[in-house]
Image: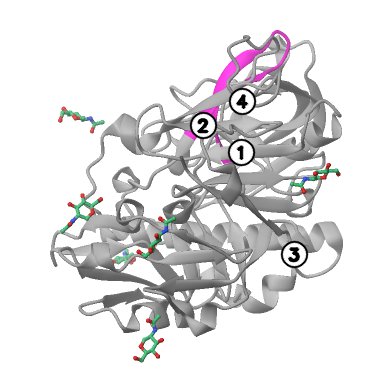
Amino acid sequence: MKFTAICALFAVAVVGSPTPPPNDRSNTGRTQRILLNSRSTAANSSKVFDPRTVWEQLGFAYRKYSATMGAYRRNTGSPHPLSSRFDVRSVAKRTTNGSVPLVNYNADLWYGEIEVGTPPKPFTVVFDTGSSDLFLPSTTCSVGCARHTQYDPSASSSAKDTGQPFVLMYGAGETAGEEYVDDVFVGGYEAKDQTVGAAWAYSPEFSKDAFPPDGLSGLAFPEISEFEGSPLFQTLAESGELPQSVIGFKLSTTPGDSEMVIGGTNTNLYRSDTLTYVPVTNKGYWQVEIDAISRLGQEVVESQAAPAIIDTGTTFVITSYSIAQSYYANISGATAHTEGTDTYWTIPCDTINSTVPTFTFGKRAFNVSAQTYNLGPDVPSGDCLAGIAASSEMEFTIVGDVYLQNVYSVFDYANATVGFAELT
Ligand SMILES: *[C@@H]1O[C@H](CO)[C@@H](O)[C@H](O)[C@H]1NC(C)=O
Ligand SMILES: *[C@@H]1O[C@H](CO)[C@@H](O)[C@H](O)[C@H]1NC(C)=O
Ligand SMILES: *[C@@H]1O[C@H](CO)[C@@H](O)[C@H](O)[C@H]1NC(C)=O
Ligand SMILES: *[C@@H]1O[C@H](CO)[C@@H](O)[C@H](O)[C@H]1NC(C)=O
Ligand SMILES: *[C@@H]1O[C@H](CO)[C@@H](O)[C@H](O)[C@H]1NC(C)=O
Ligand SMILES: *[C@@H]1O[C@H](CO)[C@@H](O)[C@H](O)[C@H]1NC(C)=O
């Protein structure tokens, strides 16, 4: 039996039509912009946070990395290089007791459209650079898929059943189904014979109310895939059709302002002179080295030259306890809240905006705005939640949407690099 994690990711997506319209604003002829919906915008959720959702987010991230590291080991025969910095022994004790009210989950996520099958049918998916598998609810789904658009392989002349079952671990529940291959259209390109997990059951985290998109599409490397076939980004990169094997993202909570582009970047959205690439240090995740996290020009010593994973599917920046503790140590009124191995910090709302971090990649400093770092007030204390959380089980940094909303990000598959640029 196979286990995959998918997680609290939240990212993007959209659709590619087989015949793209000509009003393409990206820098390539065929590429379409994929407009992304932001969940918080759609749901107009308030910025008041519920601490339970923070614990839940941190738990999801832990389970996602636990499962994907397991997949890496099975796929490559070697432990993931970061597994020595990851405490796998605590997987069992992290199992949720089921008391977390999922409806309160208000972290952000971005999603858009893909089309699957012949004739192509539209679905919405989150695109997650922190995992590698694509799944959708199928028409045979009997649990948890109500009101989602469901994939019907029998209605697609290009669908082939591989006969391979899968189980994806997600939070308290499991998502199970069967792997098919079918043609997937995304951003104006076709991924032929793409592996698609057709789910028979969705856990409550994926119910329509908790999770507006239909499915999820991982955009990382095959080393962390649970499925037999090639992950979507590899299929696209190997199709030979992309002008460049890159995906560009802009994530924003402003309606209509988020998009993903495949095969190029939208040069209107960033300052080209600031585009800075860093090499992927180990294929699997989009894993790079961060030069440092700093504040007011002071680098957190522990963060220098530390491993970092660029993950559109994680809301927070989650780092090691030592990095986070040093970061917050000099901030007046910063209060740590710890449960088990996870910690988040709150800071008085009238001063939190002046405590924002800067992340340096490839020697270029990228500021994080108060708007994305300040996650809003905690009702009991009146203090505001800061966007850098910590896990004492992960000695690496997951760079999620708190940072990624501040930059244009470029994932280059063939060159195995990640680029960041200042937004225009
Ligand atoms: C959005 O805001 C409106 C007006 O404040 C409110 O009536 C509605 O319930 C909100 N929608 C959601 C999904 O929270
Ligand atoms: C489950 O865990 C939460 C904290 O994570 C705790 O408040 C609650 O009492 C626990 N419920 C049970 C049934 O153990
Ligand atoms: C925190 O304060 C100490 C002592 O004043 C200083 O050495 C260090 O650089 C500061 N760190 C940050 C991140 O500001
Ligand atoms: C980043 O923040 C620093 C400190 O506030 C500021 O001096 C610098 O101009 C900012 N950089 C950009 C690109 O906004
Ligand atoms: C802090 O920044 C947020 C987001 O930009 C803003 O809504 C809020 O009013 C600011 N708070 C203060 C005290 O300036
Ligand atoms: C990526 O690699 C291709 C050739 O493999 C090269 O033409 C291109 O310039 C590279 N892009 C970057 C940003 O390094």
Q: Amino acid at mark 3?
A: Thr
Kindly identify the residue that appears in the image at 58 percent across and 17 percent down.
122
Q: CA distance from mark 4 to mark 3?
A: 29 Å
Q: CA distance from mark 1 to mark 2?
A: 8 Å
Give the label on residue 84, or none. none
Q: Is residue 113 magenta?
A: yes
Q: Earlier in the sequence, mark 4 or mark 1?
A: 4
**SS at mark 2 in the image:** strand
Kindly identify the residue that appears in the image at 25 percent across and 62 percent down.
353
Is the residue under label 4 in contact with that under label 2 (CB below 8 Å)?
no
Q: CA distance from mark 1 to mark 3?
A: 20 Å
Q: Amino acid at mark 1?
A: Gly
Which quadrant of the figure has residue 295? bottom left
Q: Amino acid at mark 4?
A: Ser
Give the label on residue 281, or none. 3
**Mark 1 sits on what residue?**
248
Q: Is residue 384 magenta?
A: no
Give the quarter the ligand 2 occupies.
bottom left
* Residue 221 x/y as whole percent: 75, 49
**SS at mark 4 in the image:** loop
Q: What secondary structure do most residues of the magenta stretch adopt?
A: strand
* Residue 62 x/y as whole percent: 53, 63
Q: Nearer the viewer, residue 133 or 159?
A: 133
How packed is label 3: few (under 14 Cα within 10 Å), some, or many (20 or more)?
A: some
**Mark 2 sits on what residue?**
259
